[in-house]
Image: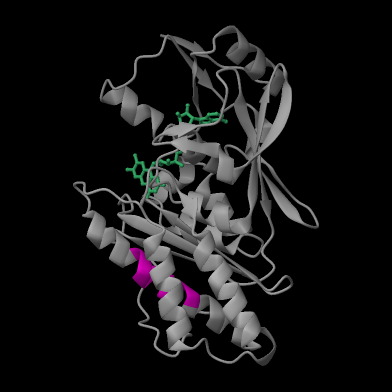
Amino acid sequence: MDFLRPARWEDALAAKAEHPSAVPIAGGTDVMVELNFDQRRPAQLLDLNRIPELYEWDTGEEEVALGACVPYTRIIEHLRRELPGLALAAHTVGSPQIRNRGSVGGNLGAASPAGDSHPPLLTAGAEVEAESVRGSRRIPVEEFFTGVKRNALADDELIKRVHIRKASGPQQFSKIGTRNAMVIAVCGFSVALRPESRRVRAAVGSAGPTPFRATAAEDFLGAALEEAGLWESGGPVPASVAKEFAGLCSAACSPIDDVRGSAAYRRHAVGVMARRTLGWAWEEYRSGGDGAGAGTDDSAGGSRCA
Ligand SMILES: Cc1cc2nc3c(=O)[nH]c(=O)nc-3n(C[C@H](O)[C@H](O)[C@H](O)COP(=O)(O)OP(=O)(O)OC[C@H]3O[C@@H](n4cnc5c(N)ncnc54)[C@H](O)[C@@H]3O)c2cc1C
């Protein structure tokens, strides 16, 4: 196996053009597992670790341009204000060692339905900047996931950055796993409130072949909050509204039975997480605080990583 180690981004693109089957390696927390278990034996590994700009981020007026290799630890330390949903999700990834190495670019490259960064990227609004020697393009994250562990990158493309809209309101994330650390999500859920446009975004992980937005639930909740004047009054979300939102999120799922959980459990769990995260986010909106408590008038409460 050849180990390609470009020090410049342009050289990485040239190497990928020359060797389209080369496997990029960032933190290696997915790639090395596959190599160790002999699930992959590529002719070339394309190491991205020497390319400085992949480890940088820019915070602009509207968005954060996050280098593909920025590790989760840095997101937690430096971007929790701009990207609270992603920072919460980053907290739940693996262990400190995995968070020190693993990246959002790698999570997108792997495109697992259970990738923890995916729901908050969907709710925040993100675009994946893909580049090749042919040029650059921005792929809306909704269009990035094309199937189980498949994404929209062409063979000669690499992820350079992810452009993520800065939070304009509370964002929350929740994940169900068999224990509270080092666990792949049985399912995950993220919600983002956008007070300025009176909109809500909701996204689900690991309850379908790809992560997805629950758009019917988003539309329902946005309209219900608007009709009841709750954005202005800051009143509690009625239990019936939270229940309907949760039901629509569950209904949007197309899960499978597997070793981690049954389809029925996943559907149920997504509904529970939808109601809880809405409660946390709405409480944060009402109080201007950290949103750690329950917020709908029947909220079940609970931990962010169960
Ligand atoms: C013990 C353990 C626990 C884990 N726990 C979690 C968890 O809780 N939640 C979770 O979501 N994941 C988890 N993972 C999986 C993994 O850590 C994440 O998917 C992580 O985000 C991968 O990032 P990386 O930088 O290590 O990617 P790598 O392993 O380097 O790459 C992953 C994939 O992306 C491709 N790739 C990497 N960079 C680019 C790029 N710039 N352009 C194009 N393709 C690229 C690679 O070729 C590969 O296919 C765990 C893994 C381990 C080993």
Whether residue 293 is visible to the viewer of this picture, yes or no, is no
Give the percent coordinates (x, y) of residue 273. Answer: 38, 69
Task: Name the residue furthest left.
Answer: 259
Q: Which residues are magenta?
A: 270-278
So how many labels did they put on this image?
Answer: 0
Residue 10 in sight here: yes
Q: 281 or 6: nearer the eye? A: 281
Q: Quadrant of ligand 1?
A: top left
Question: What residue is rendered at 43% in x and 85% in y?
Answer: 240
Report x, y in % for residue 166.
Answer: 69, 59
Kindly identify the residue that appears in the image at 22 percent across and 51 percent down. Answer: 260
Question: In the image, 23: left or right of 6?
Answer: left
The one of 65 and 241 positioned closer to us in this rendering: 241
267 falls in the magenta region: no
The picture places residue 250, in percent across and down from the top left corner, at: 37, 64
Q: Nearer the viewer, residue 140 or 292?
A: 140
The quadrant of the image that shows the C terminus is bottom left
Q: Residue at x 68, y 41 (%)?
A: 56
